[in-house]
Structures are given as C-alpha cells and as structure tokens.
Image (cartoon, grey):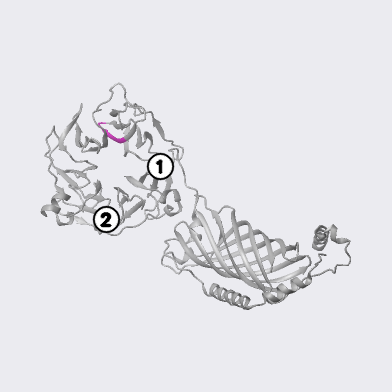
Amino acid sequence: MRTVRNRTRMEKFWIMSQGPASRVGLRISLLLLVAGILWTTGCSKDTEGIFYSLEQEEKAVDNTLPNDVRITGNMIKVTIGSESRYYLGAGSLFYRTTDLADNQPWTKIKSPISYGIVSGVAEVGGRVYVSLSNGSEHGLFRLTSDGNAYDLGSGNLYSDKQITRLFTLNNTLFASVGTILDDTFALMFWNGSNLVPTGVAGYKIVAGAWDGVNYWFASPSDLFRFNAAPSLNGWTPTPYYSYEASTESGASPAEQLNNKTYFTDLFVDDTDPSVSSPPYPLYLCSSDGYILKTKDGGVSWKSSVDHNRSFQSISKVGNIIVLGAGGSVVRELPKAVAEDDLDTLQTPGGNFLRLPDLYGSNVIRVFGFGNILYAGTTANGLWRGDYSTDPSSPVWSQE
Amino acid sequence: MKARTILPFLLVLSLFSFSPSLQGQEEITPYVPTYVLGNQILIINAGLFVPLFFQSLGGEIDNTNLSLGGVGSIQWSTYLNNEMTLGIEGGGMFSFSPNGRTLYMLPITARYAYILRAYPFEFPLSISAGINFTRLSSMFQILPIVKPGVSAYWNYSLEWAFGVNFFYWWTPNLYQGPEPPKSQSRFGNFLEISLSALYHF
C-alpha cells in the first residue's frame, strides 16, 4: 500500500480546491450535457449523409495512366483498322482501346522531339495528327497507319511556330499557331499536304466548332463565323463578335453577347434530339462564368447568369451538357439540352464527392464520348465518369 | 473463473506498486485517499479508434469502410463525492476512407463517472453525452454523441494514476430530408481504446 509523508499538504489542497471555480465548472458541465441531449439533429447543407457516404464508398478503379500528369492536349476517339481507340495528350501521347475493361492499359508513344509536349491530337482521313513542342523546337507529326508510333518517314509536317490547338472540323484539320511570346497568332488549315493560313491572323484561337453550316472559332475576346470552306487566306479576319468592338461602338450580333469575354471553349451538340437538321446548337463558355447558346447559327443567343465559375471547357455526356470548371472541377447543365436552361448548374452525383483526388483537382478539359465523360486535370491525371447506367449517378474512376 | 484470472494479476501488480525503500518504514501510516466535492482531476487520453459499424433506421448493419484511426482527448472532472465525478471532455479522432478521405470527429461532452475501487486500482464506469463536430471532406455536421465506457486505473501516487479506457462512441447522423433523404440516416458505432494519464489536484 502506498503511503504519504505529508498528509496535511494533501488535505490543504482539497480544502483549497473546494471553491467557486468548481461550482462554475459543474454548471458548465450540466449545460453541455443538456445541450448534447437536446441536439438531436445537426444542421447541414450536404447533399449526402456523412456516414451514408462512408458506407457507400468503394475504392475507385485506377487504370495505368500516371495519376499526376497534366492534360496538355485534347482527347479523340478514332477507329484504326478494327480497333477503336482513345488518344490523349498528357505531356506525351497516350492511347488505349475504348474497351473500358480494367485490364486495358494506356500505352505511351515516344515523342520524336526531345522533351516534346503534346498540345493537340486530331484525326483526318483515318490518320492521327499530333502537335508537339519543347519550347524551342516545334512540330506537327502524323502517326503510322497502325497508330502505334510517330511516322518518322513523313517527318515534321510543320515546324515554323508552336501549335497551341489542333482540331478537326468538317473533316478539315485546323491548327492555331503562335504564342504570346512571338505575338504572331494565326489560324492554319491542312490542305492535304501542308499547313497553310486561313487568313485569320492576329487572334489567338482557343477553340473551334462546326455546326453543320458554319465554322466557328473563338479567341478569348472574339468570335469568328465562316460558312465557306477554308482556302489559302480565304477568310477575312473580321470578328463576328468582338468584346472591344461591342464596348466601343455597341455593335453586336446579339444583345446576349454584349460585354462577354474570356471565351475558352466551343461545343456543337449534333446529337440534340430536338434538332433534325443543321445548324446544330452551339455552346460557348467563358472563364468569367457564362455559358451562351445559339440554335440558329448565331442569329439569336441565350446567355446564362454569371455562375461565378471559371469554365475552361464544355462537352456533352448522355443528354447532359458538362463543363470543365477549373477549381470547381466538373459541373453539369442538366436542363440545357431539353429546356435551353443555362442557369441550372449542378455537381455530378454518384461517387463524385467520395473521390478527394477528383473533387480536389483543377479540371481544364472535358471530353464526352456518348455516355462516357473524361475530365482532364492540371495535376491529377484523367478521370472517367460513366453515365451509362444512371445519368444522375455516374461512376467515376481514374484513368 | 474470472476471479481466478484477475486476482493473481492484481496481486502481481500490487507487489510491483510497492516501493522497496518504503516497505521497511513501518512508522509511516498506510493511507487511502478519500475524495470530496471539489477535488479535481485532469486526464489526458490517447489511443486507437476502432470503427465498428453503421446502423440504419431500419436496423440494418453495414461496414463503415473506415481504417483504424487515432484518438485523443483531455478531460477535467470534479468529484461530487468519493465515488462520483462530473466533468467535461474535449477530444478528437481521425480515420481514413478507402479513397483517402479523412473523417474527423471532435466531441465535446459532459462526463459522469462512478468509481469502483480496489486500491491502488480504480475502475470508473462512465457515460458522456454532448455534441460531436463531424467533418468528412467538405461535409460538416454537428451531431449528438453518447459515450459509455469503462476504465481501469492504477494509482502510481496520490497525484498520478495511469490506465486504459474502453469507450463506446454512439453518434446518430440523422436527416429529415429531402436532401439528404431520411433513408441516409445512420447511427455510428465506434470503439475507443486509449491509454490515460490522470492527475489529481
């Protein structure tokens, strides 16, 4: 048994501690106890129950694409021979089959330029074209007919300037060339043997689309519309809409476009069930929070409210328009197709909010292929949202 | 059977608690402290957090999918009499989901304990109730929590005691709908196994 040498000291402590402070502590304890009992439910703005969310969580599937890559170019779906493939610019060029089985890996194609970064990938006439640059050396290359390697036999098809965007519209390959460093922006097109200027110069083209009647191109502050096929310097570089012109003269094709700027992407919905013939609906998004839509080739426009999001890219999955929303990751416009409602914006459902590497990422590109959506990030690789089973509850996984 | 197992164990521990230097000093009176209203204790706990299961309103049991976690807390109590204490406790836990989400729960509770003694051992039977600040990613709620438990302390000195706690965390996560719907209500069931350092003052 333990003993004590100074019993008086202990007793003194006990007497000292029986003061008003203890009574205050007692009251606080009782108050907390009552508050805890009364607090039967908490307040929440969550869309999903916390414990329920944990209960439903499953480890996300992760394919072989590195999880920390930046999506530097676009993504296309191509049929080569009997195989359907995805090609993706993620620093290097990667491809995989469109068979979504987990055992279908991504394959990296070695760059013909040392440390070349892919800025664009596009398909014309069954061949895949890829633009690359390492800052000092630039190039446009074609893949071999089997799509497995760069066709070094045909060499570098264009090396004058850096290609920043590469896309195919109406079976024609377009390239936006030039950087802010040399300030010699130009829109080029592939005439079958070379990249040649369209005539649009001095504007940094960031996106293009074909609505079945018109070619549309967007620079950050301008929109261009052409209904004639491209030819060597055949297009006059006069914007259909210009932010500067609208602010200076008030002239604008449509009131809804007034003062809109910071355009980032265009998308034509050629699968809108309500539109049987072109022009198909065109969507335009901007990094200052707007989405615009025209269903009549640009005669009239509808604008969203300011969503206060930095929209970087726009596409469609299933019957839902989706936006790559930068730090806001991915947002859906569930009523844009059927009701032209550009104001109802929502976060994807399913396991989206159970994947911190996804909802904590910065999405700069979205690519929709039927019911499959891909979201390209700045540092968290590529994510796939499978909307095929239930559009309101897509299954997300990491490529 | 239990007594046969526990008594030798207690006996061995009791022997270790004797200081050889004091055993020969028969002139010192053995002393078992008695506590009265106003005597206070401060306890620091740290240990493991074991996720057990979630239960729906319908009674279905399901896995939490959480990893083994960590828990820590600090508690202050005052004696109501020699057998009972009442105090407050604040602490926190963390645990990870399969995709790396972190669940944090920070309960603040009022704690009542009834103490069984076999000096130098004490066995507080306790119950805590209060509020539980719960965060999972961007989701946050303040939930009610009840924590019944049992502890075993060995009094090293009149000031200090050390022990182990087994606290059951029962925290309802209830919704009225429409979002989140009522069907997503769950009762969280967890177990805290922690070590304690207790200081009398």
Position in image of residue B46 (x %, y %): 63, 58
Q: Residues within 10 Å of mark 2 (few under 14, many from 20)?
A: many
Residue B125 at x, y percent in the picture: 69, 69
Q: Up-down: is B42 above or below A182?
A: below
Which residue in the structure is indicated by mark 2? Answer: A336
Question: In which quadrant is the N terminus of chain A drawn?
Answer: bottom right
Q: Is residue A194 above or below residue A250?
A: above
Task: Say which of A292 and A114 sits in front.
Answer: A114
Relative image position of residue A118 (x, y in whole percent): 33, 34
Amino acid marked by disc 2? Ala
Numbered disc 2: secondary structure: helix
Q: Which mark is residue A381?
A: 1
Residue A83's quadrant in the figure?
Answer: top left
Q: Is residue A103 visible?
A: yes
Left or right relative to A255: residue B40: right
Residues at marks 2 and 1, common chain? yes
Q: Chain of mark 2?
A: A
Q: Is residue A396 magenta?
A: no
Query: Image height check: is A382 above or below A109?
Result: below
**Label 2 with label 1: CB-CB less than 8 Å:** no
Subunit that carries the residue with mark 1: A
Residue displayed at 13% across by 34% down: A233
